[in-house]
Amino acid sequence: MNELHIKTMADYMAAGEEPEILFWVGCAGSFDERAQKITKAVATILNNIGIKFAILGTEESCTGDPAKRAGNEFLFQMMAMTNIELLNAYNIKKIVTACPHCFNTLKNEYPGLGGNYEVIHHSQLIQQFINEGRLKIENGETFKGKKITYHDPCYLGRANGVYEAPRAVIEQLDAELTEMKRCRSNGLCCGAGGAQMFKEPEKGNKDINIERTEEALALKPDVIAVSCPFCMTMIRDGVKLAEKEEIVQVLDIAEIATKANGWT
């Protein structure tokens, strides 16, 4: 990320300036090697569009989402209040995040604790850039003739009704968008939203990420598109188990946009 010359909020404050938007990176985007590539793709888009943005850097901590989902409301509120105090001190107005879990928590659960911000998912920001003519999806890797299917993350889709923004990016490509039978409001969770990524599988005949990946692979796609770092892990594991890594890519929407523009 250093080569992208990203400023922190502390840098902006020291210069007496404010960015247009805060990029909330999230735990996965910060520490998971595969998700770091998604973080880099989002930052690359923001840089190329010319958006004045910042990150919190070492001042960013967990939103508290895992604690809340695990039922520890006290710990969640402690973490949230600490973050809100920091965000308010920096006079943050608008936040973009590449993680639907962070997106949902910042957007829907922080206002009740005094954290009121405009929060958008990176797919929505990319769609906005496309609608404004600032991002044209051209001059890069071609997706012409490729078949792409999109997996809806639970905390972006069912929890917040964001279905079209990620598809808007794919629709800009000269590719075939093929939907799985269980998509949009009827989409099947990959398991990460139910914490299956962090513990032993529930009793049953098949892991849920395998079930979901098999649905995608049945369409014989060239690319399975996602827009959540946790979905990325679950679907990639399913593709690996099916021994399809050589013929099926799992890409985030931001990575598709950067590849299509030759920004990688």
Image (cartoon, rainbow, N blue to C red):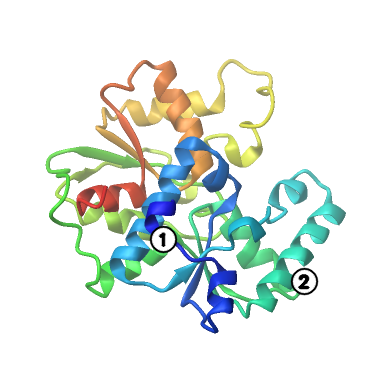
Q: Which mark is residue 263?
A: none
Residue 15 at x, y percent in the picture: 53, 80
**Visible in this render: residue 188?**
no
Q: Which mark is residue 113?
A: 2
Relative depth, front residue between 228 and 259: 259
Residue placed at 20% from the left, 58% from the top? 137
For the residue marked with disc 1, what is the amino acid? His
Instruction: Quickly name the residue at label 1.
Output: 5
Residue 205 against residue 39 in the figure, above or below: above
Residue placed at 54% from the left, 53% from the top? 100
Relative depth, front residue between 130 and 79: 79
Residue 105 against residue 186 in the figure, above or below: below
Circle 2 packing at 10 Å, graded few (<14), some (14-19), many (20+), is few
Q: Which quadrant of the structure image shows residue 241? A: top left
For the residue marked with disc 2, what is the amino acid? Leu
Residue 217 at x, y percent in the picture: 34, 26
Residue 191 at x, y percent in the picture: 58, 34
Residue 262 at x, y percent in the picture: 20, 51
Residue 238 against residue 47 in the figure, above or below: above
Q: Which of marks 2 and 1 is nearer the N terminus?
A: 1
